[in-house]
Amino acid sequence: MEKQILFTHSSIVIPPPVLPSREIGACVEFQGLVRELEQGAALAGLQYEAHESMARKHLDRIFDELCAAHPCAAVLFIHRLGWVPVGEASLFVRVLSSHRGEALRFLADAIDRMKADVPIWKCAKK
Amino acid sequence: MQVKLLAFAQARDQLGWPERVVDCEPGETPRAILARVAPGARLETWRVAVDEEYQSWDSPIGHAREIALIPPVSGG
């Protein structure tokens, strides 16, 4: 599986998909956006930080584990760090696979695992 | 030996520092090191990672180079 794990302090620029083979039949993409209301309070944005090298290492392992369960050809993971204003993307994930089922399950599980174990944090204060 | 302690997010806010280097012994546990460096730190909701792997608070650190204090994660 091709894996790309990127962190950026700038707005996420979504690259065009590059298909690793002609057997790709599904391209599933997800963007996580910063919402204005967080636990009832209106926010201007969120501040993100990460233990970047540890996050990269754990994401890489999680993707390998998920690929064994839901075979996919490629994953692109981009997480923004620093201040992210309301309405902008903090996360972009793209999964490519032969069939939609594997890509959809891979994507859902990858985000769940990230939210449980990957050292990335958001904070309401700038 | 010396080990680098990293504190992220709420752990950094509570402790008041993002990083420091401490002297310790291979037989010491993360819990013992924290008790010495930051007595009173509330560890209940934090996890600890030793050389970037989650570990028990009560396992000896061995010849680790880094201990990271990991409050509940919230990426995405």
Image (cartoon, rainbow, N blue to C red):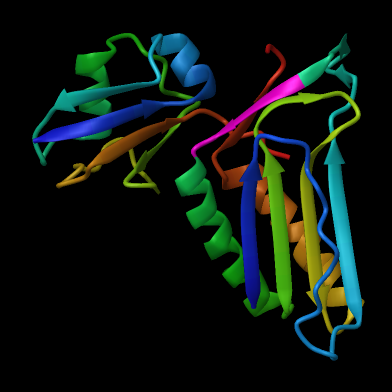
Would you identify the image quadrant in which residue A74 lies?
bottom right
Q: Is residue A74 magenta?
A: no
Q: Nearer the viewer, residue B33 or B12?
A: B12
Would you identify the image quadrant in which residue A90 lies?
top right
Q: Residue at x 76, y 44 (%)?
A: A91
Report the quarter where the C terminus of chain A lies: top right
Relative to A66, residue B57 above or below? above
Q: Residue at x 46, y 47 (%)?
A: A54
- Please state the horizontal and vertical placement of residue A43, each as a whole percent of the image: 84, 13
Q: Is residue A50 magenta?
A: yes
The chief SS type of the magenta part is strand
Left or right relative to A36: residue A49? left
Q: Nearer the viewer, residue B39 or A58?
A: A58
Left or right relative to A35: residue A116? left
Left or right relative to A76: residue B35? left
Q: Residue at x 70, y 50 (%)?
A: A78
- Please state the horizontal and vertical placement of residue A122, each as a whole percent of the image: 67, 27
- Please state the horizontal and vertical placement of residue B23, each as a whole percent of the image: 12, 26
Would you identify the image quadrant in which residue B38 lies?
top left
- Please state the horizontal and vertical placement of residue A108, each as a whole percent of the image: 80, 58
Left or right relative to B58: residue A74? right
Relative to A106, residue B73 above or below? above
Q: Magenta residues, as a range?
A: A46-51
Q: Residue at x 83, y 17 (%)?
A: A39
Relative to A71, residue B66 above or below? above
